[in-house]
């Protein structure tokens, strides 16, 4: 009787699963991981069977359940391990299992308009030999004077017995009647073959010839031992920029494949890491499925099937690649593990690094986290002995890490802007963008035909428009943020909701003319550079110049081919690029991220500086880094200037003791939002009160509620936002509190929303 019912996960925003009975005819086919069509409300929907039998909490009578309508799969779309992984996510991040499964499966399999339909498989007509002619005499007798038919037949033989019809009649020039002749003799048949739509397919595998250095070999020995042990484990590889971490991943993956297992490689964003992806494709060719955001639904579905059927054994992609349906998983690599893009910013708010670790544990394999600047969470876990820490302290090539010079913006002057006696009129000279030192350094690179990378992590022209008379600041109509002036578009733009307006000619409050545009963004730097270096070939890379799908790749290709002298950009140019021609990295203003009201602001500043500095001097010529800042003594900058990750981490870990923040505690951010501020504030208050009472009631200790308070961005897309933080010494207790909260949420008024973000990457 117990197996006549099942729990089904539905991709809708409610926690828990729904129970259904299984009609007689479907008993054989309903099992965990297959999709079923079930009644829900007036219409049906499609879900995934979570388990047979009923969950313990269920109070309904099994006899009164509605029946499963249909079973859609013969083999499960989520195998037991993947299903277990999704259950872990549902539990840990208090998110609906059905929504997680929808994220984990290729689009179209669950939910959406298509609902159940699998994206159509594309097929092509092929010609295939069905009768072999063994001897020459056979051939002479069979073909007689039909020389063209014989030629076509032998061409097919040389193509391993089959070829696309279009290829034979197109490129190879055989007429259709020749092919029909072969069919008529019963030598070949026409058939349909599914086509892989992977646009990366067909690239030849060329094994790069580099041999691991002694350092890399030492690290590899340890990793191979861990990977071969058959138990789940985590290694943290801290390798300075240019220490050759990618080669370590490649070699390790090769041993894993040789042992008949498969691997996943997570990268922060495919379009920003084309070189890393190319090296995997280069080494493993068609064994690799590249899961990038440019894939169509059909292509994604093809890649998913190829992985599931074992035709490809490596999945490389951003965070959702952690769900790649590989069997016999032997390795999960998380490259640049500190990257915040591994955290999904909407439901389910999972962190791919955490999921990767759990997946490796379920598969009994190694999870390898790699970075030059590990997240403090991972570093802390390493020091506590939970992860095995391996280090590469030296660059493999070039001249060691580049020298870093800090330039004090408080005393510097703008390049070419006259002498010190002008100081009184500084305001009229405009902002400081390029100091004389930076200008000289760029000039020297241009003269020597070397390349420069310049970073400013702020796009637009001016980030702030204010009235000098009354102090009015132009803010977004929907969000509590200032509008950024984009000069080329001649608009003020909100970077959060996209609202835009014409720039003001005068103040609409006091009428004073000419509001001031302050706060330098990349667009303004580009203009200044064009003035200072009119002959330089300059490219800007930020969200505004990379709107189209492959724009990043085009800019980076041109830079690699040395068609660009100076590459200016936001943090997107700081990541993983390996260009030997770059000998100078300049940071226009290192303070940009330092004042963001978030406990990770310092960590992010250090990471960004160290990563961007790491782009310099990777080739034959030594690298130099110039960092403009008004806080040269800040430890994040001072430690970055020395490439001293360990020193930075020690200080920052100490700073997070008081007030206490991760990694010393577990954190969840609860955001209440709604259209009316008073109701949002009231709800946040009662939520905080409720949570405190719950903690008292259950006598949970080591857990603390902070707030409520308005969020740093207290209005976003027209919604007011308040939040409270829950800090806990123990993961399990935090989880318990969040589950209670999630159930309370169901009672909240429909217009108000409460969002739970466990292990938040941003508190804004
Ligand atoms: P990381 O990711 O640690 O910053 P990469 O993996 O990009 O470093 O390697 C930096 C450069 O060093 C690459 O151009 C790579 O081809 C080269 N490299 C790596 N290992 C070796 C080696 N053992 N011998 C020669 N060159 C190497
Ligand atoms: Zn806005």
Image (cartoon, helix red, strand yellow):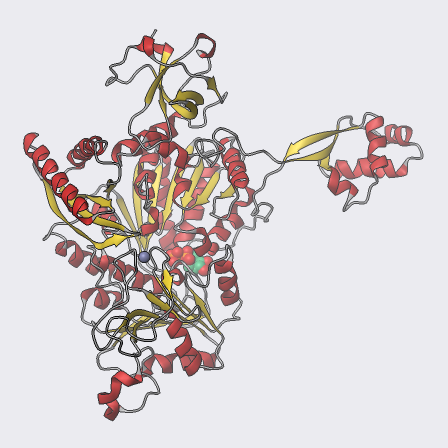
Q: Quadrant of ligand 2?
A: bottom left
**Front residue of 558 and 485:** 485
The answer to which quarter of the image holds residue 317 is top left
Q: Quadrant of residue 733?
A: top left
Asked whether, in this view, residue 459 is left or right of residue 138, the answer is left
Q: Is residue 394 above or below residue 385?
A: below
x, y percent for residue 727:
14, 43
Q: Residue at x 38, y 51 (%)?
A: 268
**Quarter containing the N terminus:** top left
Could one spot residue 222 in this view of the protein?
A: no
Q: Foreground residue, 107 or 638? A: 107
Farthest residue, direction bottom: 421
Viewed as shown, does residue 336 lie left or right of 412? right
Residue 155 against residue 492 in the figure, above or below:
above
Instruction: Give the residue at the far right of this rendering.
Output: 145
How far from the left and from the top, in percent, is residue 508?
Answer: 28, 71
User: Can residue 651 be seen in the rendering of this structure?
Assistant: yes
For the residue pair 588 and 681, the one nearer the viewer reads as: 681
Is the residue 638 above or below the residue 141 in the image? below
Q: Residue at x 8, y 30 (%)?
A: 698
- x, y (%) of residue 659? 10, 52
């Amino acid at each position: 009787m117990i197996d006549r019912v099942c729990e089904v996960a539905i991709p809708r925003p409610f926690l828990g699963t729904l129970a259904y009975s299984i009609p007689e005819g479907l008993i054989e086919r309903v099992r965990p991981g297959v999709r079923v069509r079930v009644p829900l409300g007036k219409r049906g929907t499609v879900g995934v069977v979570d388990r047979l039998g009923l969950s313990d909490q269920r109070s309904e009578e099994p006899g009164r359940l509605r029946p499963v309508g249909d079973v859609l799969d013969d083999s499960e779309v989520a195998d037991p391990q993947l299903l277990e992984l999704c259950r872990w996510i549902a539990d840990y991040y208090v998110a609906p299992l059905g929504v997680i499964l929808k994220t984990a499966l290729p689009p179209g399999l669950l939910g959406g308009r298509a609902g159940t339909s699998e994206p159509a498989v594309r097929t092509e007509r092929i010609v295939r030999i069905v009768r072999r002619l063994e001897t020459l005499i056979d051939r002479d007798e069979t073909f007689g004077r039909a020389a063209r038919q014989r030629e076509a037949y032998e061409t097919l033989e040389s193509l391993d017995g089959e070829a696309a019809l279009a290829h034979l009649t197109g490129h190879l020039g055989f007429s259709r009647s020749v092919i029909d002749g072969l069919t008529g003799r019963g030598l070949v048949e026409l058939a349909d073959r599914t086509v892989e739509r992977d646009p990366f397919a067909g690239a030849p595998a060329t094994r790069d010839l580099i041999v691991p250095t002694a350092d890399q070999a030492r690290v590899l020995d340890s990793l191979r031992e861990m990977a071969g042990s058959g138990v789940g484990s985590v290694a943290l590889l801290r390798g300075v920029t240019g220490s050759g971490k990618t080669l370590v991943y490649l070699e390790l993956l090769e041993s894993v494949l040789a042992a008949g297992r498969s691997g996943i490689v997570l990268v922060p964003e495919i379009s920003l890491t084309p070189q890393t992806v190319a090296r995997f494709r280069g080494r493993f060719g068609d064994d690799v499925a590249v899961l990038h955001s440019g894939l169509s639904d059909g292509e994604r579905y093809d890649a998913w099937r190829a992985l599931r059927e074992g035709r490809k054994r490596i999945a490389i992609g951003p965070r959702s690649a952690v769900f790649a349906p590989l069997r016999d998983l032997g390795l999960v690599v998380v490259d640049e593990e500190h990257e915040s893009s591994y955290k999904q910013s909407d439901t389910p708010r999972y962190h791919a690094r955490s999921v990767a670790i759990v997946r490796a544990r379920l598969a009994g394999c190694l999870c390898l986290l790699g970075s030059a600047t590990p997240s403090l969470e991972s570093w802390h876990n390493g020091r506590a002995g939970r992860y095995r820490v391996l280090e590469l302290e030296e660059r493999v090539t070039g001249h060691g890490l580049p020298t870093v010079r800090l330039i004090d913006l408080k005393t510097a002057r703008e390049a070419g802007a006259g002498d010190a006696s002008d100081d009184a009129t500084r305001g009229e000279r405009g902002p400081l963008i390029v100091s004389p030192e930076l200008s000289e350094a760029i000039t020297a690179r241009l003269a020597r035909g070397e390349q420069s990378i310049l970073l400013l992590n702020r796009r637009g022209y001016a980030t702030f428009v204010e009235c000098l008379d009354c102090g009015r600041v132009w803010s977004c109509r929907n969000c509590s943020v200032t509008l950024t002036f984009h000069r080329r578009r001649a608009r003020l733009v909100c970077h959060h909701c996209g609202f835009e307006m014409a720039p003001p000619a005068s103040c609409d409050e006091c009428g004073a003319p000419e509001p001031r545009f302050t706060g330098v963004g990349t667009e303004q730097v580009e203009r200044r550079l064009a003035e200072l270096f009119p002959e330089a070939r300059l490219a800007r890379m930020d969200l505004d110049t990379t709107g189209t799908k492959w724009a990043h790749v085009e800019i980076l290709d041109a830079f690699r081919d040395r068609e660009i002298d100076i590459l200016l950009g936001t943090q997107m140019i700081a990541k993983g690029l390996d260009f030997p021609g770059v000998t100078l990295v300049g940071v226009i203003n290192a303070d940009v991220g330092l004042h963001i009201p978030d406990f990770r602001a310092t960590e992010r500043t250090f990471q960004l500086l160290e990563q961007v500095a790491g782009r310099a001097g990777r080739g034959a010529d030594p690298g130099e880094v110039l960092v403009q800042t008004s806080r040269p003594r800040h430890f994040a900058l001072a430690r970055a200037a020395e490439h001293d990750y360990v020193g930075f981490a020690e200080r920052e870990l100490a700073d997070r003791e008081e007030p206490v923040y991760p990694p010393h505690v577990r954190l969840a951010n609860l955001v209440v939002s709604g259209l009316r501020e008073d109701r949002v504030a009231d709800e946040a208050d009662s939520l905080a009160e409720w949570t405190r009472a719950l903690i008292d009631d259950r006598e949970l200790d080591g857990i603390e509620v902070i707030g409520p308070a308005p969020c740093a961005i207290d209005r976003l897309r027209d919604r007011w936002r308040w939040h409270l933080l829950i800090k806990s010494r123990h993961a399990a207790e935090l989880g318990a509190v969040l589950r209670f909260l999630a159930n309370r949420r169901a009672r909240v008024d429909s217009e108000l929303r409460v969002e739970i973000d466990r292990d938040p990457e941003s508190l804004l």
